[in-house]
Amino acid sequence: MLSKELRRGLLSILAGLALWELLTRLLLENELLIPPPSSVLRTLWELSATGQLNKHLSATLFEFVCGFSTACVIGILLGYFMGRYKWFDDVMDPWIATLYSIPVVAFVPFIIIWFGIGMLSKVIVVFKITAVAIMLNTAAGIKNIDPTWLELSDSLRLSPWQTTVKIRFPAALPYIVTGMRLGVGRAMLGVIVAELMAANAGLGYLLRDASETWDSPKLFMTVLLLAGMGMGSFALIKKAEQRLAPWRETAEW
Amino acid sequence: MAGPVLELRNLTKEVSTGGQEPFVIFNNVNLSVKEGEFVSIVGPSGCGKTTLLRVVNGLMPPSSGQIFLDGKEQSGADNDLVMGFVFQGASLLPWRTSLKNVLLGLEGRKSSKEAEEAARHYLNLVGLSGFENHYPHQLSGGMQQRINLARALAVNPRILLMDEPFAALDAQTRIFMQLELLRIWSQTKKTVIFITHMISEAILLSDRVIVFSHRPGRVRSEFPVPLARPRNLDIKSDHRFVELENVVWKQIEEEVKAAGGFARL
Amino acid sequence: MLKLISVLSGLALWHALATYIVNDAALLVSPLVVIAKAYEMLFVTGDLYPHLYASSWIFLQGMVLATVVGVPIGFLMALSPVVRDYVNPWMTALYTTPRIAFAPVILLWLGIDLTAKVIIVFLGCVFPILINSFYGMRVVSRDFVEVGRSFRLSRRSLFLKILLPASVPFILAGLRLAVGRGLTGVAIAEWFGATEGLGYLIFFAGQTLNLPILFVGVAVFALLGILGFQLLRVVEGLASPWRKELPVK
C-alpha cells in the first residue's frame, strides 16, 4: 500500500498528464505549441529505434560522469588542504570564490574557445562547476570541525593519519555531500548549456536542434528527458547522502 | 472560602501510535487547587507532567475527563486568559525585544498605552527595568526566564502554569531564581501549578507537593508543606524540610524502579 | 596579505601567459587589455550601459515576480499538507530539471519578447524562494507556536506575529540564493534571442571570438552577482537584527 503522500503525488501527476493530453487534443489544432503527450511518446519511440536517442543520451552522460568523478577526487583533496592550511586557503580562496560567483553561462564560452566543441570542453565545464562547489564545502567542513573532537583525538593519542581518517574526514563528510549536491544541479545545467552553445551530440545539442527546426514533439521529449535526468541524479545523490552520512538529516530537495 | 479555583476530574490523555493500543500519557488524574495556592508536581522523567500542564492550558485536548474552573466545566481553550504559561526553554520570540515579548499577550486586549504600562510594570517586578529594548539573545538565561515569567504575569492570569521554568539554568542561578519567584509570588498572590524534577525546589516553593507515578502518570500521593512563609534558604536545613525531601525521594525512587530502573531514564 | 599576493601574482601570470606564450588575441588576452576595454565601454563609448540596463530590468522583474509568487505558494504548502502533497511532484520535476531546458519552450510559446525573458528569469529564481519560504514556515519552532496559543492569539495574529517573522530570515536566504540563478536565467534568456543585454554581449563576443568584450561581460556578470548577494546580506542584517548569521546553502 502506498503512503498517502505518494498516492496524492501520483494522482496529481497522472491527472496532469491526462489533462494535458485532453486539452491539446480538444482545444489546440496546432501541435506546434503544445504537442499531446502521445506524440511526445511516439517521437521518443522513433528516436530510440534509430539509435539517435542513445547517441545523444550517452554523450551527455559520459561527459557528466567523467567531469563529476574527477571533480570529486580533486575537489575533496584541494578542499581538505584549504581547510587544513591557512596559507593555502589564502592563496586559493580569491580565485575559487571568483570562479564560484561567475554564473555558469558566463564562462562556458571561454571553455569552448579554449577546449573546442568536442566532449573535452563539456567534461571541463562539469569538472569546474563541481570541483569548485566541493572544494568550498570541504574546506568549510574541515575548518568548522568541533575542537573538542580534535582534543579527544589528541587525548586518545591518535596519529595524524588516524585523526584525518577517523575524525576530520567523517566530520566533513556532510559538507562534502552538500557540495556534491550543489555540484550536480549546476553541472547538469552547465553541460546542457555547453552542448547548446557548440556541440555535435548530447541532449543540449538535441534541444537546440529541436528548437531551431520547430520540432515541438522532439523539443518536449528532450525537456522531459532532462527532467528525468535531473530527478534521477537528485534521487541518487539523496541515496548517497543517506548512505554516507546517515547521522545527519537529509534535505527534502 | 469558595470551592477550588481549578479542579481536574479523571483527566486522561492518550495518543494513537498507529498500532492497536493507544499510548497512555497520563491516566485518571484528579487534582484540585485552591485560590492562591502554590502546588508543585514532581515525578520521574517522562511521567506526563508536562503534557498534563499543556492539556490544562488547552494547548492539547484531553482524551477524557473534565477540567473545572471555578466550578464551571471547560470545553476547549478559553479565550480570556485565565491561565498564564511559563515555558521551559527558549520560548521568547527572538525577533521581539524584552518589552515586545511581554506585550505579546496584551496586544489587542488592552489599549496600547495601558498595555505598555502593564508590560513595564511586570518587567520592573521581575527586576529587568532598563532592559526593555534588549533582544533575547543579548540576555543571560536567567534574565530570559524572568522575561518569560513577566510575559505570563502581564496578562494578569488567575492561574500561573510553570513548566520546569528553571531547568535550563545553572545551579546557582537556579537558586536565585527560586528566591525571586518566592518574592514575586508573595507580591502577586497567584495560584500556581509548578512542574519540576527537583524535589528541594518543589518543597521550597510550594504549599503542597504532588508526586506523580511513572507512565501512565497519575497522582500517587500528595504532601502539604508544613513550613511557614515567608521562606528563605534557611528552611532547607529545617528537619521537616529534610524529612519531606527524603520521603518524596523514596517514592520517586520506587516509581523509577517500577518503570524499569535507573538505566532507562 | 597572502591573498593579495596570490591575486597579484595570478594576474601577472595571466598577463605573461597572454602576451609572451599564447600571443593570440583569439585565445587569451592580458588583463590589461580587459581593463582598457572595460574603461572604454564604461567611460568613453558608454557601450556597456544599454546592455546593463536591459539585463537589470529583466532581472528585477523576474525576481519580484518570483518573490510575489514563490512566498505565498511556499507558505501554503507549509500550512496545508494536502496542497503540499499535490504540488510536490511538479515542484520536484521543475526544480531538478536543468532550467535551460525550459527556455526554448517558453520562447516557442511567447516569442522573444520581454515577457518570455522575464519568465525564464522567474523560473530560475522562484524555486529557492519558494522552498525557503516553505522550510521557514515549517520549521518554526513548536515552542513558539505554543507560546502563541497559550496567549490565545487569533489565527491571524499567530500568522502575523509568530509564523511570518520566524520565516523572514529563511525567505531572505532564499532570495540570496535566487540572485545567482536569476542572473543565469538572464544570460540564458538573452542568448536565445535578443539584440541587447549582457547575455547577448557574452554570446555575441563568444561567437565572434572577441575576447576583451567576453571578459568584460563575464566580469560585469560576476560583479552583479556579488553585489546582489552582498546587498541581500545587508538587508538580512537589517531585517533580522536578532540573528547572527544564517548558513549559506
Image (spheres, grey):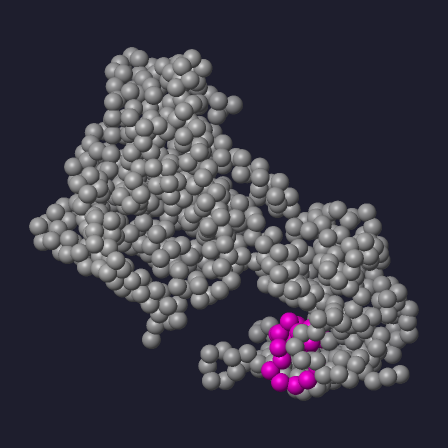
Q: Is residue B62 magenta?
A: yes
The one of C84 and B265 positioned closer to us in this rendering: C84
Tell me the quadrant of the picture where the N terminus of chain A can be found.
Answer: bottom left
Instruction: Looking at this view, name the residue that lies furthest to the left.
Output: A50
Residue at the spot 67% in from the left edge and 80% down from the top edge:
B75
Q: Is residue C216 magenta?
A: no
From where the camera sits, is residue B203 visible? no
Residue C98, above or below C16: below
Residue at the spot 29% in from the left edge and 26% down from the top edge:
C204
**Drawn side of residue C129 relative to residue B47, left or right:** left
Spot occupied by residue C220 in the image (x, y as percentages of width and height): 42, 26
Residue at the spot 31% in from the left edge and 13% down from the top edge:
C19
Spot occupied by residue B92 in the image (x, y as percentages of width and height): 68, 56
Spot occupied by residue B56 in the image (x, y as percentages of width and height): 69, 76
The one of C22 and A28 positioned closer to us in this rendering: A28
Q: How many numbered marks are there?
A: 0
The one of B75 and B55 positioned closer to us in this rendering: B75
Spot occupied by residue C93 in the image (x, y as percentages of width and height): 33, 54
Q: Which residues are magenta?
A: B42-67
Quarter residue A62 falls in? top left
**Drawn side of residue C82 relative to residue B75, left or right:** left
**Drawn side of residue C80 relative to residue A44, left or right:** right
Residue at the spot 83% in from the left edge and 55% down from the top edge:
B117
Residue A140, above or below A235: above
Quarter residue B239 falls in? bottom right
Tell me the quadrant of the picture where the C terminus of chain A can be found.
Answer: bottom left
The one of A227 and B238 positioned closer to us in this rendering: A227
From where the camera sits, is residue C237 visible? yes
